[in-house]
Amino acid sequence: MKYLLYSVIVCLFLAGCHSTKPTVLKSQDEQVANTTQNDTVKIENKDEDYEIIIIDPGFNTFLYGSAKPRGFHNQTYLENRNRIYVTEWNRRVLQPQVYNPNLYEMQINYDPQIDYGYEVNYLLYNYFIYFQLKYKQRLGPYTPRI
């Protein structure tokens, strides 16, 4: 009877130890390629000759999971905030000895006189919010919040 009880316990233990779904390991290159592809946001307007490419792992997840929905802020609000954030961003790009050059790699050519449309301003604004929250930076007088 003891032997039977031990056998049942061992069988239950072994049954509980196996994985229920197969694990597929990807190479590091595949993971980076998938992350880059899935976290790349590209906005372009060939008529106006501008393009924004945002490559930051986690931005798409933030955009679709945490950001305010389209239409929550009007275009004027987004343009005003983007003007402040772009000005501070570009100031930091020009001071690599003070600010991390790995965070602020290149300037953003954002002209407030150009109407980029709602979508460009929405995505740029949300990238700035995401960037500030992720890297614990503050690009203006406003506390970044979702």
Image (cartoon, rainbow, N blue to C red):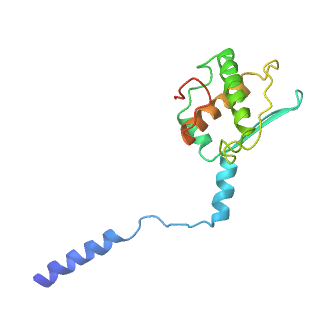
Please identify the quarter of the rendering in which residue 85 is found.
Answer: top right
Please identify the quarter of the rendering in which residue 72 is found.
Answer: top right
Q: Nearer the viewer, residue 18 or 146?
A: 146
What is the quadrant of the N terminus in the image?
bottom left
Taking the spot 81% from the left edge, 24% from the top edge, the residue there is 111
Q: Position of residue 6 (x, y in %)?
A: 17, 80
Q: Position of residue 51 (x, y in %)?
A: 81, 35
Q: Is residue 74 above or below residue 9?
A: above
Q: Position of residue 29 (x, y in %)?
A: 67, 63
Q: Nearer the viewer, residue 140 or 1?
A: 140
Q: Is residue 119 left or right of residue 6?
A: right
Taking the spot 78% from the left edge, 27% from the top edge, the residue there is 110
Taking the spot 71% from the left edge, 29% from the top edge, the residue there is 86
Please identify the quarter of the rendering in which residue 95 is found.
Answer: top right
Q: Position of residue 14 (x, y in %)?
A: 31, 75
Q: Is residue 124 above or below residue 93?
A: above
